[in-house]
Image (tube, grey):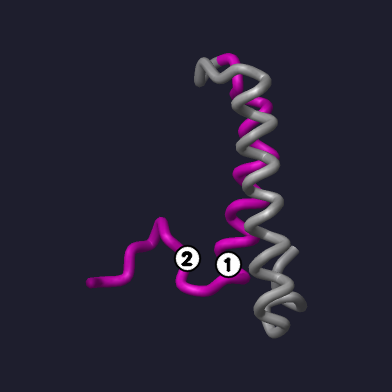
Amino acid sequence: MSNQGYFSATGAERSVKLAHFCTKLPVHRVELGFSLENIANTLANSDFYIRRVQSCKPAVQKNAL
């Protein structure tokens, strides 16, 4: 499969993109039609993923967030 520009190659890059997404999601919640509960769940899942990547891959810790 070829490299896709919208999907980061490394865990650190994914963490940074996901953190950026998390800052934008609440701002555009109404436009997207998401409820506060959906936003809260998505942000919690995203935070979990970011922490998981950072804790499982120590080399990523210094590069992510």
Q: What is the number of the mark on residue 64?
A: none
User: Residue 28 location in percent, x, y?
Assistant: 60, 24
Tag 1 near tag 2, CB within 8 Å: yes
* For marks 1 and 2 on the same chain, the one whose residue lies earlier in the sequence: 2
Q: Nearer the viewer, residue 28 or 60?
A: 60
- SS for callout 1: helix
Which range is magenta? Answer: 1-30
Q: Nearer the viewer, residue 8 or 59?
A: 59
C-alpha separation, residue under disc 1 versus residue under disc 2: 6 Å
Q: Which residue is mark 2?
A: 8
Residue drawn at (69%, 31%), measured in percent from left and top?
40
Residue drawn at (69%, 84%), measured in percent from left and top?
59
Image quarter of residue 16? bottom right
5 vs 2, left or right, is right
Q: Nearer the viewer, residue 1 or 40?
A: 40
Image quarter of residue 29? top right
User: Residue 7 location in percent, x, y?
Assistant: 42, 60
Q: How many marks?
A: 2
3 vs 34, left or right, is left
Q: Which residue is mark 1?
A: 13
In the current view of this chain or complex, which residue is farthest to the bottom? 59
User: Residue 34 location in percent, x, y?
Assistant: 55, 20
In the current view of this chain or complex, which residue is farthest to the left? 1
User: Residue 57 location in percent, x, y?
Assistant: 66, 80
On whether residue 25 falls in the magenta region, the answer is yes
Residue drawn at (59%, 15%), measured in percent from left and top?
30
The quarter of the picture where the N terminus appears is: bottom left
- SS for callout 2: loop
Q: Amino acid at mark 2?
A: Ser
